[in-house]
Amino acid sequence: EKWISAINDEKKAHDQNKTWRLVDESEANGRKILTSRWVFRVKDDGRYKARLVVRGCQQQPGIDFEETYSPVVGTDALRILVAHAVKHNLHIKKFDVRTAFLHGILEEDIFMRLPEGYKSNGKICKLEKSLYGLRQASERWHSRLVTFLKTLKLKPMITDQCIFVNEDRSLILAIHVDDGILFGKDEEKMRRLLKSMEKEFELTIVDNPSTFLGMEFEKTPDSIKITQKSYSENILTKFRMMDAISASTPLVSYKPIDQKDGTKRSDYPYREAVGSLLYLSTKTRPDLSFAVGYCSRYVENPDNNDVANVKRIMKFLKGTQEQGITFDVKSPEELRVYCDSDYAGDRSHTKSTSGYVIYYCGGPISWKCLLTTLILSE
C-alpha cells in the first residue's frame, strides 16, 4: 500500500510538471525509443519513495544528448562561506528543490516507453522535460536554474559558477545540484528571494540548518564547528571497527613500499575503505590527509601491513569523531598559509611528500598532502 501511494505521488508530480506527452510510435520516425523502469527505496526519514527513471544507457551520443557536465559548489568555497557567515554574523538557510531534474528543458527529441503501472493505450512518450536517468539531466537542470536565478538579478561569481550574489552582495547563494544554502544579513531579503524561487520550484526550506551535504554544523553565538560525526560512525560500523580500541595517532610510521610483506589481501575491501576515509579527509578532517594519502598509494595491491594501516586510521577516528573545523568570530579575518615538505621520504622512488593548509577565521579552508611527481636533488 505504501509503495502504491509512492507510485501515485510520482505520477502526480509528472502530471503537474507535464514531463511528457503521449504520441503515436510513428512520430519517433526511426529514433531510438528508450525504455524506463521504477526504482524504489526507503529514505532516511522513513518515507517510501518511488522514482520513474529512463534507461539513459540506451542513449546515443550526438543524437540523444550532447553536454552532460554540470558544476557544483567547491568544498573549499563552501567552507569559506561558512567562515564568512560566522565572522559577519550572517543568517543561514538551506533548501532543496523537489523533483529538480524534472524542471530541465530538453533540446533533443527523446522518446520513451512507459513502465508497468501506466496505461499508454499503445502510445509512447515524447519527453517535454528532463527525466531521471537521462545523461543530460543534471546539465539541463543546472542550466534551467542558472537562467532563472539571473532573472532574480543574481549573478554567478567568476571564481565559482555555483555561487551567486545579488547586486549589493548582501545575499550569497551556493548551489550543489538540487541543494542550496543561502547566507545574508537581512533575513527579510532572504525570505523574499526564497519566496520568488518557490513560485518557480517546490522548495523544502530549513532555517538555521544543522546539516548540509553531510556536514554537521554545531553553532554557538561566536562560532560554528563543522563535523561529520554521523558519516564517521557509518564508516566504523561498515568496516566493523566500532568496538576497536582507539589509537592516539592515525599512522604509526612511514613504511617504504619495498618493505611490503607480499601477502595480498583480496579478502579486505581496502579500496572501498580508503575511498570512504578519503572523502572524510577532504571535507572536515585535514588531520587525516597524510595517512589516507599514504594508504591510497597501495590500493592496487594491498598487503597485511597496508590493511593494518587503514585499520589504524579507523582506530584513530574512533576516538576523534567529535573533531572537525571551527570558525570563530574572534579570529582575524585574514588568510594564513602553512606549507612543508619532507625530502625523499618515499625511499623506493626517492620522491618527497609536500603539503599545505590555508586558514581563515581560525579554521582550515583548504589543504592538500601529496607525493611530488619530481625527484628532487636537494
Image (cartoon, grey):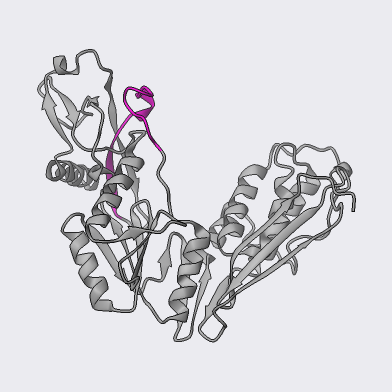
Answer with the quarter of the image where residue 268 lies.
Answer: top right
Q: Residue at image x 46%, y 71%?
A: 82
72 or 122, which lies in front? 72
Q: Count all numbered tags in the image, as a single digit.
A: 0
Q: Residue at image x 25%, y 35%?
A: 106
337 or 344, which lies in front? 337
Answer with the quarter of the image where residue 184 lies.
Answer: bottom left
Q: Is residue 61 left or right of residue 329?
A: left
Which quadrant holds the C terminus? bottom right
Answer with the quarter of the image where residue 137 lies.
Answer: top left
x, y percent for residue 372: 76, 49
297 or 265, which lies in front? 297
x, y percent for residue 43: 35, 53
**Vertically, is 107 above or below 241?**
above
**Vertically, is 212 above or below 47?**
below
Extent of the magenta region: 47-68
Q: Is residue 376 left or right of residue 286?
A: right
Whether residue 59 appears in magenta in the rendering, the answer is yes
Residue 38 visible to an observer of this rendering: yes
Q: Is residue 34 left or right of residue 70?
A: left
Q: Residue at image x 35%, y 57%?
A: 179
Residue 45 visible to an observer of this rendering: no
Whether residue 55 appears in magenta in the rendering, the answer is yes
Q: Residue at image x 41%, y 82%?
A: 89
